[in-house]
Amino acid sequence: MANTLQSKKRARQNARRLDVNKARRSRIRTFLRKVEEAIASGDKEAAQNALRAAQPELMRGVSKGVFHKNTASRKMARLSSRVKSLG
């Protein structure tokens, strides 16, 4: 339990940041899931459109500190190669 005023304030701030980051991470995962579903359906055009929509969301998560830069780059590279391999 937080005792000092500063630690109580930090606990409040951390709780707020947790909510914001959780929502942001959930939103990014939704965009990534749409790409996965388009790949699974075999629709290359839909997969490309979903990937183009997901990329700025993922990079926004990086700039906001939700994901590490290399993690986002790895996810984008793997998804784009899978989209590219669709017939």
Image: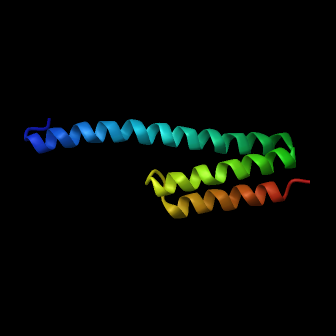
Q: Is residue 1 above or below residue 64?
A: above
The residue drawn where x is 39% and y is 35% is 19
Taking the view exactly as shown, the residue that stands out farthest to the left is: 4
Q: Nearer the viewer, residue 60 or 38?
A: 60
Is 8 situated left or right of 75 in this image? left
Picture mark count: 0
Colour theme: rainbow
Picture quadrant where residue 41 is located: top right
The residue drawn where x is 9% and y is 40% is 5
Is 29 situated left or right of 40 in this image? left
The residue drawn where x is 30% and y is 36% is 15
Q: Nearer the viewer, residue 84 or 51?
A: 51
Is 3 situated left or right of 14 in this image? left
Picture quadrant where residue 82 is located: bottom right
Q: Is residue 57 above or below residue 81?
A: above
Q: Can you give x and y, in whole percent of width and height, for residue 31 in the image?
A: 65, 42
Q: Can you give x and y, in whole percent of width and height, for residue 86 in the image?
A: 86, 53
Picture quadrant where residue 33 is located: top right
Is 18 situated left or right of 31 in this image? left
Quadrant of the frame with the C terminus? bottom right
Q: Can you give x and y, in whole percent of width and height, for residue 74 in the image?
A: 61, 61
Q: Can you give x and y, in whole percent of width and height, for residue 4 in the image?
A: 7, 41
Quadrant of the frame with the N terminus? top left
The residue drawn where x is 72% and y is 52% is 52
